[in-house]
Image: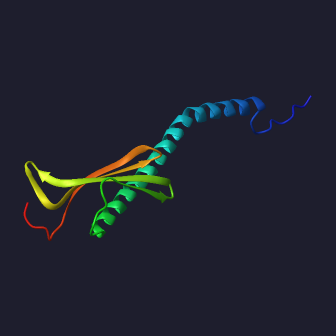
Amino acid sequence: MIKPAARPGFTLVEAIVALVFLAVMLTALLPAFANNMRANSVNEIRTGAIAVAQQEVDNLRAVGTWPSSPIVTNVATGNGTYQSTITYSQYCNGATCYVGARDVTVEVRHNGRLYYRVRTVFTSLDATGP
């Protein structure tokens, strides 16, 4: 009796073992992919919050008179709506307070969560004396 020639390729058992191995490897890597996607989403929101804060600070530089503190605005962007809260008071260094100088804090929130806070001092170049 003549034996048939061996055919090259995988047997059904080998294919199933390879699929099980692939499934185990993908299952092990899935949490890493999920964490990476979550981190990317948070970074996109934080980048949007920084852009909103920069825009708010630029707007403050452009105006001559300021409304009363706090100033709360909603800013719509590609990542959703951010809430910007600007608070300010006269800038003082110890017991010395300066005319035309303001201690300004800008906080930016997305869905109620604080993503960015910046604090700076604005001065008016035409103000005189402390």
Residue 75: name its quadrant: bottom left
The answer to which of 58 and 13 lies nearer the viewer is 58
In the figure, is residue 129 to the left or right of 15? left
Q: Position of residue 103 (x, y in %)?
A: 21, 54
| Residue 114 versus residue 1 in the image, above or below | below
Residue name at image x 13 percent, y 52 percent: 92
In the figure, is residue 86 to the left or right of 16? left
The answer to which of 30 and 110 lies nearer the viewer is 110
Outermost front residue: 68
The answer to which of 123 and 8 lies nearer the viewer is 123
Q: Position of residue 96 (x, y in %)?
A: 7, 53
Residue 25: name its quadrant: top right
Q: Position of residue 12 (x, y in %)?
A: 77, 32
How are the residues colored? rainbow
Please give the count of numbered marks on the rendered protein: 0
Quarter occupied by the N terminus: top right
Outermost right residue: 1
In the figure, is residue 38 to the left or right of 53? right
Quarter occupied by the C terminus: bottom left
Residue name at image x 33 percent, y 65 percent: 59
The answer to which of 123 and 64 lies nearer the viewer is 64
Residue name at image x 83 percent, y 36 percent: 5
Q: Position of residue 65 (x, y in %)?
A: 27, 67
